[in-house]
Amino acid sequence: MERTNKGCSFPQSGTALSMTNDETVISEASVLVPLLQDQAPFACLSSPPLLRRSSLSNLRVRRICPSDFVEICSWVRSSRALQMVSSDDGDRLTPEILARWIAAAEREFVVARSSSDKAIGFCTLSRSEAPLPEGVIEFCHQVLNPWNISLHVSYHLCEAAKSFAHSHRFSSIVTRSLPSNRYALALARIEETREVTGKGPWATSPFRWFAFDMAQYQVGQRFSAYQYGLKGNTEHERIAQNLVC
């Protein structure tokens, strides 16, 4: 059986996938400098690619389509990059792993360019990947096209997650990050989450856990540099400042 949404059909876990790849792109967040050496073709470049600038008006959020699977998997091409976004074992993200994420999720989101509908960001919301308390949902598996890294993409994913959590009456959104994932830690700081590592049996190491209280959420809140708190000189704010137009 297939679920459908806005003209896209996508398979349940276990359904065979048949897709072609029209472009090969590489790995996860390029702000994670040590990861760059793991990903071809970065090894062929004298320096990492410049971050693409994305505006809010050029992007839209939608559900996933079969044609997105190979594209999204092409962003995570090493075991180290996979460990940044998942507890799955493997030397890269595969369509089978991605299908498992989606099957375990309450909802998945794709950020795509409005003009081409090409995916450039992905995440899930799940209650099944950790023994969460009632009323709590987890923001999981955020992966970004490394040639289009921008806080505007993460903003769309975070706002879609908050909107879903709000409409389904969740009291908070939690997320986890490895201590070495500088982009995820920066995003947690910018989103004004509070750290809850060790505050429950689910919030355990080796991850750092963060929570966003849905009481803070304002429907239709607009993106701005001020909203994202880019006003200090901490390392996380400096990382974020390089990712926003």
Image (cartoon, grey):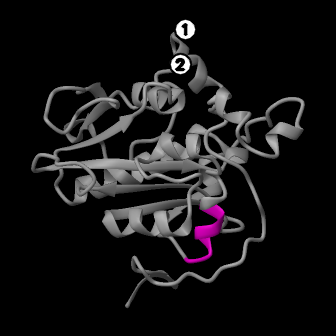
Res 159 visible? yes
Residue 192 is situated, as x and y percent measured from the top left of the image, at 35, 27
Q: Is residue 69 magenta?
A: yes
In screen coordinates, is 56 left or right of 179? right
Give neighbour class at mark 2: few <14, some 14-19, many 20+ (Cα, 10 Å).
some
Task: Kindly identify which residue carries mark 2.
Answer: 237
Q: Nearer the viewer, residue 83 or 72?
A: 83
Front-most of residues 124 and 219: 124
CB of mark 2 within 8 Å of CB of mark 1?
yes
- Percent position of residue 125, x then y: 33, 55
Residue sitting at x 29%, y 56%: 126
Count of picture labels: 2
The residue lying at 83 percent from left, 38 percent from top is: 43
Q: Quadrant of the C terminus?
A: top right
Structural crowding at the residue carrying mark 1, measured as other residues with C-alpha within 10 Å and reported as few (<14), some (14–19) or many (≥20): few
At 9% from the left edge and 50% from the top edge, which residue is drawn?
134
In which quadrant of the rendered image does the N terminus lie? Answer: bottom left
Tell me the amino acid under the disc marked 2.
Answer: Glu
Give 3 or 57, whichever is nearer the viewer: 3
Give the numbered dot on residue 155.
Answer: none
Task: From the viewer's perspective, tell me whether residue 47 is left or right of residue 36.
Answer: right
> Position of 206 compared to 35: left or right?
left
In the image, which residues are magenta?
66-72
Q: Is residue 77 left or right of residue 94?
A: right
- Residue on which the image places disc 1: 233
**CA distance for labels 2 and 1:** 6 Å
Does residue 28 sit above or below 112 in this rendering?
above
Which secondary structure, mark 1? loop
Kindly report the secondary structure that dominates the magenta region of the rendered protein.
helix
Q: Position of residue 214 (x, y in %)?
A: 22, 41
Q: Secondary structure at mark 2?
A: helix
